[in-house]
C-alpha cells in the first residue's frame, strides 16, 4: 500500500530526492511518523489590511498573523485513520513566536479519484483545498492549491477568487547542510502576496503504531466531504 503522496505523484515520486521520498512515505503502511524541527528564517504577511483576516484565521489555527525572523519551528506529520476510515496525515506546524506559540493546522487525505490531495485546514476543517503535487527535475517537491471550499453544516460553497488565495509550497533537501528547506507563499490574484514563510529543518522518524497520535494533534471536528 502506497502513501497518499506516492499515489498522487505516481512515477514522479521516484524523481524526488531520497530524503523527500522517505519524508513523504509517512503513512499507515510505513507505520512511520515524521517530526521536523528547525528555524524559519522569515515569516511575513502582506499589506496591513491582510492582518485582520489572518488574525481571524488564527482563531482556528489557520495561517499566522505575526511576522518574525529566526523563529523556532516544528512540523508534525503523523498518519492515522480518521473517523470516516480515511488515511489522514497531519501537517501541524508550530511557530515559537515571542510571547506565544502559533499553530497552522492541516490534515491531508487522498482525493476520491487519487489524482489530488484534499487539504482540510484548521481545528474544525471548515476550509478544504485541492492540492496538486509535482516532482521537479532537481528532486524538489512543488505543491500548489486549487479550488477552496467552505463547509459548515449544510453549507458547502466554493470560495470566490476575490477573497480566496493560491498557496504554493516548495520543499527540497540540501545535501550540504543535511537539512530540508521549505518555502511557502499564499497569494491572492487581485491583492498579491498575503502570507508566507521560509526556512529549514531536520527530520526524525518514529513508529506511530507504538507512539500513537498525541493529544491535540487531531482536529476538533472532521469533515467527510472531499
Image (cartoon, grey):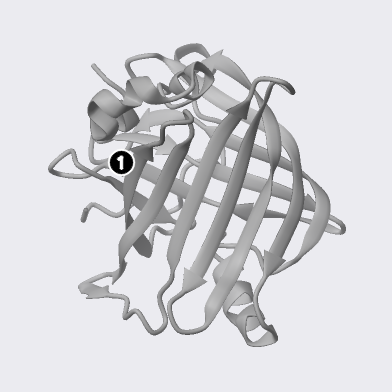
User: Residue 143: percent from the left, percent from the top?
Assistant: 41, 47
Placement of 127 over or under 51, stated as above or below: above
Q: Which residue is drawn at 75% across and 55% down?
A: 42
Q: Which residue is drawn at 31% across and 81% down?
A: 160
Q: Quadrant of residue 3?
A: top left
Q: Residue at x 21, y 53 (%)?
A: 226
Q: Nearer the viewer, residue 23 or 206?
A: 23
Placement of 111 over or under 34, stated as above or below: below
Would you say 173 lies left or right of 69 here? left
Q: How many labels does the image show?
A: 1
User: Residue 48: percent from the left, percent from the top?
Assistant: 69, 85
Q: Which of 51 and 219 is in front in this view?
A: 51
Question: Which residue is the site of mark 1?
Answer: 109
Would you say 85 lies left or right of 138 here? left
- Neighbours of disc 1 within 10 Å: few (<14), some (14-19), many (20+): many
Q: Residue at x 35, y 40 (%)?
A: 134
Q: Residue furthest front?
A: 137
Q: Quadrant of residue 113?
A: top left
Q: Nearer the viewer, residue 165 or 204?
A: 165
Q: Quadrant of residue 75?
A: top right
Residue 177 visible to an observer of this rendering? yes
Label 1, secondary structure: give it.
strand
Q: Which residue lies furthest to the bottom in this view?
A: 49
Would you say 113 lies left or right of 10 here? left
Placement of 68 over or under 204, stated as above or below: below
Amino acid at each position: 500500500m502506497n502513501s497518499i503522496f506516492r499515489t498522487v505523484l505516481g512515477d514522479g515520486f521516484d524523481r524526488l530526492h531520497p530524503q523527500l521520498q522517505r519524508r513523504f512515505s509517512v503513512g499507515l503502511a510505513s507505520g512511520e511518523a515524521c517530526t521536523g524541527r528547525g528555524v524559519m528564517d522569515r515569516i511575513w504577511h502582506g499589506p496591513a489590511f491582510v492582518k485582520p483576516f489572518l488574525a481571524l484565521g488564527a482563531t482556528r489555527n489557520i495561517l499566522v498573523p505575526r511576522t518574525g525572523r529566526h523563529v523556532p519551528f516544528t512540523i508534525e506529520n503523523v498518519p492515522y485513520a480518521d473517523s470516516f476510515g480515511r488515511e489522514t496525515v497531519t501537517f501541524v506546524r508550530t511557530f515559537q513566536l515571542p510571547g506565544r506559540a502559533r499553530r497552522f493546522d492541516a490534515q491531508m487525505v487522498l482525493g476520491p479519484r487519487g489524482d489530488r490531495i484534499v487539504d482540510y485546514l484548521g481545528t474544525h476543517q471548515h476550509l478544504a483545498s485541492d492540492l496538486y503535487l509535482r516532482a521537479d527535475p532537481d528532486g524538489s517537491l512543488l505543491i500548489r492549491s486549487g479550488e477552496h471550499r467552505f463547509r459548515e453544516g449544510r453549507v458547502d460553497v466554493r470560495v470566490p477568487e476575490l477573497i480566496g488565495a493560491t498557496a504554493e509550497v516548495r520543499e527540497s533537501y540540501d545535501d550540504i547542510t543535511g537539512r530540508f528547506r521549505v518555502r511557502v507563499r499564499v497569494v491572492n490574484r487581485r491583492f498579491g502576496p498575503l502570507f508566507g514563510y521560509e526556512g529549514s529543518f531536520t527530520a526524525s522518524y518514529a513508529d506511530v503504531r507504538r507512539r500513537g497520535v498525541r493529544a491535540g494533534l487531531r482536529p476538533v471536528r472532521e469533515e467527510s466531504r472531499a
